[in-house]
Image (spheres, grey):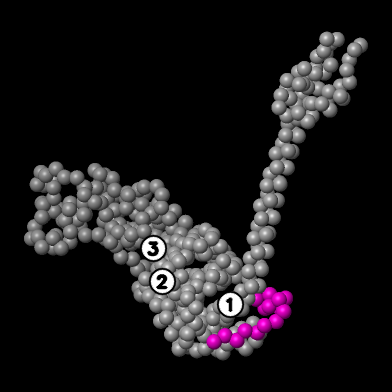
Amino acid sequence: DGKKDIMAHKTKLLPKENGANESIMTATTSDDGPLLDNEHVASEQAAIDLLSKANLQLENCRGRLAQLNHAAEQRLQLYCEEDENQDILRAWCSKVVSYVLKPQSTEVSDLSKPLQDGSLSKPMLWLIHEADRLQILKFLDVTNIINVFYCLAWSLKCLKILSRKPTYLEMVQIIDSSSKFKLHDERSLRILKNILQRARHWQGKVRKALAPIPGETKNIDVAYLTALTKEAKNIPLILPEESQLWHTIDDNGARHCLCGGPSIGSFMMGCDTCQLWFHGSCVNLNQEAGDALDSWLCPSCTGEETTVATCPVVPALEGPAPAENHGTEHHVSDGEDATNMASPHAPDVTKLWPPFSVGDTPQSSNFATISDAAVLKAALRQYALTSGMRESIGNKYSATLADDPIGAVGELSSSSSDESSKDTDLEPPVQVNTGSINDQRENK
């Protein structure tokens, strides 16, 4: 009947991407009559769409493969550079062992111990400075060791704080400071975040319950406030809102002042005429000025028009609760230690440093011989690691370490380049054991 070969048309249509619809419509009819029905047209279009997607995925795979090849080349190049700098790397790692991980003496151990605020010690910062001067910060092993410095300092700070009942603000600081480095195991950090999340949820309920309502005279539900205090016992934090609850409960949930808020333990002033009580901050009166007055009349009794200046009662707002204490002290419940002493089950932080006790450095092929504390002190004086350098090196490095441990290398200040002149007068003597490349890589 003059029909053409349908398979021939399919073969011609499949490789085409541009103008495919037009080709299909042309191939479906001829002078002698229809060639393909609508079902065949839809099938042809679906095949073309699949082919287009396959080509796109193929291009993506080729691009990814090119990236992996480039990364493999860079890693291979980095391995070669490590082999070229193996003596320097071994000497630097030996200093890490002798000055931080396993100090030779108690004096060196005390010098290398991280500060109480979680900052790195001077020997740690000096080792970072040395790695920068020796241009070995680009190596992953060096970066990991420096990250361990920050982990050790953070962990000791956490153990000291968590040995007793921490405050809300201390927990916030612990979690915020953990973002400056990478923890190898974040399970403990997730537990702390969960505790803080529970505390914030509880604070939101307290803020809503104690919210000031101008003109309201009905007392706050004391039973609900008591239930909130019991709920707070399951949160291992000292929360500033807890003392506000106890003061409100002691006052039977009464509302006072122009703001309609409860008594939360802050300074309040009583009117000599109406005998009502007002928050000092709501009527622009501090405790020192109030104590100096023989008598005082509230704005309602004097006929003055005034607005609430600064209400001390926490507002019922959504979101995380404020970290400040609102000027109230922590309420000590029955049986609670007022001094908040450390738990007898908590480890003694002073005995946890150094990581591998104090002793002589192992004399093996893996470690070099390092001199004693006098050399370390001389090196610290040489590089003048003052508080200013601690901020310029340690904090600047930690700020970029969490985002890009390798890229953090380039963020270090180049101000130490002048000091990187071949000044080795105070360098600790190093004995390097040479061997085959395979042995050296295994030791490293």
Q: Quadrant of the C terminus?
A: bottom right
Q: Give the labeled residue for mark 2.
A: 390
Q: Are marks 1 and 3 in contact (CB under 8 Å)?
A: no
Check disc 1: other Cα within 10 Å, few if <14, some if 14-19, many if 20+: some
Observer-side mark, 2 or 1, equals 1
Instruction: Give the magenta-colored segment's residue range.
Output: 429-444
440 in the magenta segment: yes
Which residue is painted at 19% across and 56% down in the image?
Answer: 280
**First in residue order: circle 2 vs circle 1:** 1
Q: Give the labeled residue for mark 1.
A: 88
Observer-side mark, 3 or 2, equals 2
Q: CA distance from mark 2 to mark 1?
A: 24 Å
44 in the magenta segment: no
Q: CA distance from mark 3 to mark 2?
A: 25 Å
Q: Secondary structure at mark 3?
A: helix
Instruction: Please state if 308 lies on the left or on the right of 405 as rendered.
Output: left
Q: Give the labeled residue for mark 3.
A: 169
Residue 44 sits in which quadrant?
Answer: top right
Number of disc labels: 3
